[in-house]
Structure formats: C-alpha cells, structure tokens
Amino acid sequence: MTTAVLIVALSACGTPSPSADNTSTAGVPTAAETPAPSAAPRASLSTGTIPAPAQRTPTPVETSAAATVSPDSPVATPSPSVPASSPTPVAEAPAEPAELSDPESVTVVVNKRRPLNPVDYFPSGLVLPAVPLAVQEPNALLRGDTAAAVEELFAAAADDGVGLTMVSGYRSYQDQVSTYEHWVAQHGGNTDEADRISARAGFSEHQTGLSFDVGQADGACTLSSCFADTAAGQWMAANAHRFGFILRYPSGAQDITGFSGEAWHYRYVGVDVAQAMRDEGIATLEEYFGLPAAPGY
C-alpha cells in the first residue's frame, strides 16, 4: 500500500489601502455716487478727544503553517478565510460654506482664528457715506452696500430724534498694525491685554469695509462701555438689525468672539441674517453659523 501524503497549505494576505494696500481716497464717490457734502456735519466732541479705535495600520497578514495529513486521517476541509472587519467609516463634517471665508461676502466671518485671505485684503468700491463724521474722511470709508445701509440707518435714527456719528470705518492692514501697536503700548507691552480690545492686522473686521464704530452726535461715551446707556446706544441696539447690522461683540461673549464687549461696533451682514439672528436670539456670528469659538489666536 502506497503511502499518500497530502499537503494542504493555507494562507491569507492583504494589501494595505494604500494687495498692495491702497487707502487713497482720491475720486472716491459717496454711497449715492455723488460727492459727500463739503460741510458734512461733525460731531461735537465736548467730552474730549476720541481715542484710537479699539479694536472677533493595515491589518497584519495571517498565514497558517502547511499541514501534513496522515493517510489514515480524514482530509480536513480548510475553513474559508474570514476577512478582518473593516472599521466603521467616520462621517466627514459638512464642508463650510465658501462665503464664510470669502472677504468679498457680507457673511465672511473674521476672528482670532479666521484671518482674512489674503491678510492684506483691500476691499474694492469703498465710498464715503453721507452721514455726520467724527473722523477724517479716509477713516470713514465703507463698502458701497454697507455705506448705503448706514445712510438709511442714520436717517431713521434722526427721524426718531437720535443723533448718530461715524467714529471709524474701513482700516487698511497698515492702519490696523498701528492701531494694535498703540494698544500694546497703552498696556505697557502686554499683548494679552491689547488682544482683548484690538485685533491684530489681518484679523480685523474693519479691514473688510463691512464694520463701523458709531457714536452719539454730542460725543458722549465715545468708544466707552457707557455708550450702551446713551440714547444712541439704545436706539442702535433696538433697531440696527432692520438695516442689516448686528452688534458684533456683545458684552459677555468674549469667550466666543475673543473681544470684550463693544457696544459701539456694528457689522453689516445683510437684513436676512441680521433679522434671523434677532428672531432666534443668537448673539454672535460664530454661534449662528455653527463655527468654533475664537477666544484667542
């Protein structure tokens, strides 16, 4: 009787998956495309001079050894190889809408963790709104859509007997460098303190041309926390949304926006967003768009 030897080899294998900043205002039209009145009313700053603006592993291969089957033993049928279980795929977060990072969009979100792109971004079409100014013309320019909304807002306030004044508008990258350095110096070189009240260049909403600082016509509480208690501050808080503006840095939201409350800093986002935030009781852009908080850089 001839001895038969049956060699059964079992094996498994797997392949691993594999601008130049240009703040020149020569020839800049107003929001209505007409020159601003030469004698634009100016705010009376009876309370003092305005300070500098303060300024969001593959699976291992398993191989079985060859088995020699005795002629007197039944031939074992190899069990089918069971592939290793694949990990449960992790759902990817939905892509962020492009308009939230596009500096040309009215809904761009700029904060300490969301710099402008490019950082020296310069908005086109800046105009001078025909409203009372508390600053020189270059510091009061705004994007055309924002300037038009500001004019409507100021007119409505005047109809209600409230005098407003423009304290600060667009600031270039270099202007923001100077503004931030001013506040660092004011706090003895302490950047942590400066960061609470002023944005670093490239991270400032003022650079978009969508933001402005508002004051009361008589200069009361300009760029101060008490502005919230003035007639102008209260009117703005109650009505700004009707014209597409939101209070960008509400008091108590520093852990989200990264800045102390600024009752005077308003941002144009369009009427739809401003009204929706008002209706839903949402105070910040970060919360409204579901973005991470930005308490620091």
Image (tube, rainbow, N blue to C red):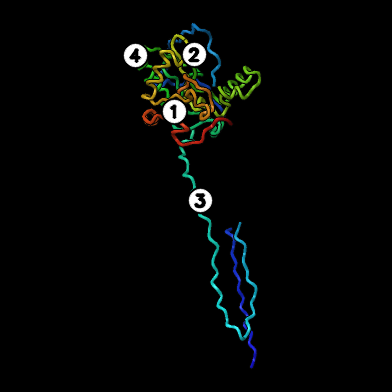
Residue sitting at x 59%, y 64%: 14
Which numbered dot is residue 90? 3
SS at badge 2: loop
Q: Nearer the viewer, mark 3 or mark 2?
A: 3
Dots 4 and 1: beta carbons under 8 Å? Answer: no
Give x and y (percent) for residue 9. Answer: 62, 76
Local packing at callout 2 (Cα closer than 10 Å; few below 14, some 14-19, many 20+) is many
In the rendered image of this protein, does residue 74 appear above or below residue 209?
Answer: below
Amino acid tagged 1: Ala
Q: Which residue is mark 2?
A: 222
Place of residue 209 in the rendered image (x, y in percent of width and height, measured from the top left) = 48, 25
Checking the image for residue 160, the label placed there is: 4
How many angstroms separate mark 3 from mark 1 (CA)? 32 Å
Amino acid of disc 4: Asp
Comes first in the chain, label 3 or label 2: 3
Residue 68 vertical placement versus 111 (above, below): below
What amino acid does circle 3 point to? Val
